[in-house]
Image (cartoon, helix red, strand yellow):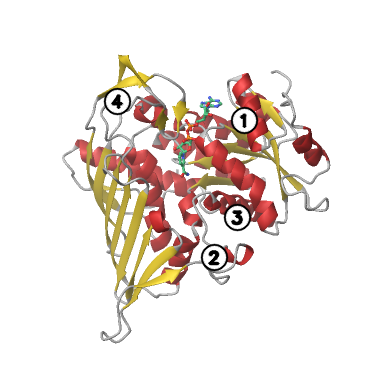
Amino acid sequence: MGQPQQPEGAEVAAAATEAGTGATGASATRPPLRVGMVGYAFMGAAHSQGWRTAGRVFDLPLDPVPAAICGRDADAVREAALRHGWASAETDWRALVARDDIDLVDICTPGDSHAEIALAALAAGKHVLCEKPLANTVDEAEAMTRAAEAAAARGQVAMVGFNYRRVPATALARRMVAEGRVGRLRHVRVVYLQDWLVDPQAPMTWRLRREQAGSGALGDLGAHIVDLAQYLTGERLAGVSALTETFVRERPLPGGAARGLGAASADPAATGQVTVDDAAVFTGRFPSGALASFEATRYATGRKNALRIELNGERGSLAFDLERLNELQYHDATEPGEHAGFRRILVTEPEHPYLDAWWPPGHGLGYEHTFVHQARDLVHTIAEGRRPDPSFADGLHVQRVLTAVEESAGKNSVYTPIAADPAAV
Ligand SMILES: NC(=O)c1ccc[n+]([C@@H]2O[C@H](COP(=O)([O-])OP(=O)(O)OC[C@H]3O[C@@H](n4cnc5c(N)ncnc54)[C@H](O)[C@@H]3O)[C@@H](O)[C@H]2O)c1
């Protein structure tokens, strides 16, 4: 294993790390939480933002230190370290995991490497944050959950990166459901709509290859909405009936570097096979009897990142749209019909989740703040020795749902039950 590389010009970050002042520069008294992150593209950038900012906005019991970033290309990872403020760079995740100056490994790579990195990191005594979906298969997710349970007994924390739980409006919706403001639930209606594959000439990416991504829109977008539905209701899905489809089965290979969810350009001379679903549509049952419907697609022309959820209960309804993420719609069915109706709650008051540390009311937050909140919550979980939320067991249950969706879709939508006790792996 090579020596960690110091990115040129990273003296500031390195000096801060040595002084124990980490990302915040605020306190030399709080113990550091030294983070090593694997992957530095989309999620790597978003998580960097989270680690850099959490301690500057929130009073944290530990000081997150962006200690090391890891990628396979030496030049690119050095550049990423500089851009995102990491003190050192590694080109092999095994070297990162082996370092005794790393407390937490943050996994921001495609799903095919989640299990291997997480298992090694837990075995090495690190806390772990793993991007969603937890793994590419139920077997992997079970092994990860077993390892996380064993590590928890040693005081380690392993959390999954379902960041949409950390939007203030969704966290408020969860609180309102728990307070009984929706009452007995009847319907959970969720869609996650993107459109970056509408063009049949949009190039291949790892997201369209089963061996790397596990599944397509299902594991990418469906994982988020299954988790969010379960989080908001406080219940786990009992079974599903599903359809999946791959609309375009062959695409040009990328002609240049990756950009966002896809690649910047296509190479018209060469093509690759799409081996995942493009869209998944499924219904499900919650143990309480509530019915759920889900749609995850990359072909919703004109919809960019439309995660929408609506809950209907005996006492009221809640509705959320990620494209208007500072708002929560609420209908209180106990109000006289004359005045009742959906009203908009602008979720920017200091009483709302996470908002006491941010800007004055009406000065909204955005997508990136979910990663700041994720870092904040994880730091508290570690410092306070609590169980993580969402845990690897929660991620495993989502994986079971994804697998049940694929099984059901393979059998003409036959209703497919999901194991009730995912903790027993
Ligand atoms: N929470 C969210 O909202 C959200 C959004 C997008 C992606 N994701 C998840 O985040 C993960 C990463 O997705 P992304 O969009 O950042 O992908 P990406 O393609 O933008 O970045 C992947 C990174 O992983 C690196 N990488 C791949 N294999 C590696 C290995 N073996 N060792 C070291 N580095 C390796 C790549 O070089 C790249 O830096 C996936 O699990 C994805 O599902 C989550």
> Which circle marks residue 374 in the picture?
none
Q: Is residue 234 above or below residue 372?
A: below
**Mark 4 or 2, nearer chain start:** 4
Q: Amino acid at mark 2?
A: Pro
Residue 274, numbered circle = 4
Residue annotated with mark 2: 353
> Do residues under tags 4 and 2 come within 8 Å of each other at their CB atoms?
no
Labelled disc at residue 377 = 3
Mark 2 vs 3: CB contact within 8 A: no
Q: Is residue 177 left or right of residue 71?
A: left
Image quarter in which the C terminus is found: top left
Q: Nearer the viewer, residue 142 or 369?
A: 369
Q: Does residue 237 lie above or below 123 as drawn?
A: below
Which of the two discs, 4 and 1, labels the residue nearer the N terminus?
1
Residue 181 location (% of width, % of height): 39, 75
For residue 80, which numbered disc appears in the image?
Answer: 1
Decide: few, some or many residues near mark 2? Use Cα within 10 Å; few <14, some 14-19, many ≥20.
Answer: many
- Left/right placement of residue 117 relative to residue 293 reads right
Q: Secondary structure at mark 1?
A: helix
**Residue behind label 1 places its C-beta within 8 angstroms of ligand 1:** yes
Q: Left of 341 or right of it: where is 3?
A: right
Q: Amino acid at mark 4?
A: Val
Q: Earlier in the sequence, mark 2 or mark 3?
A: 2
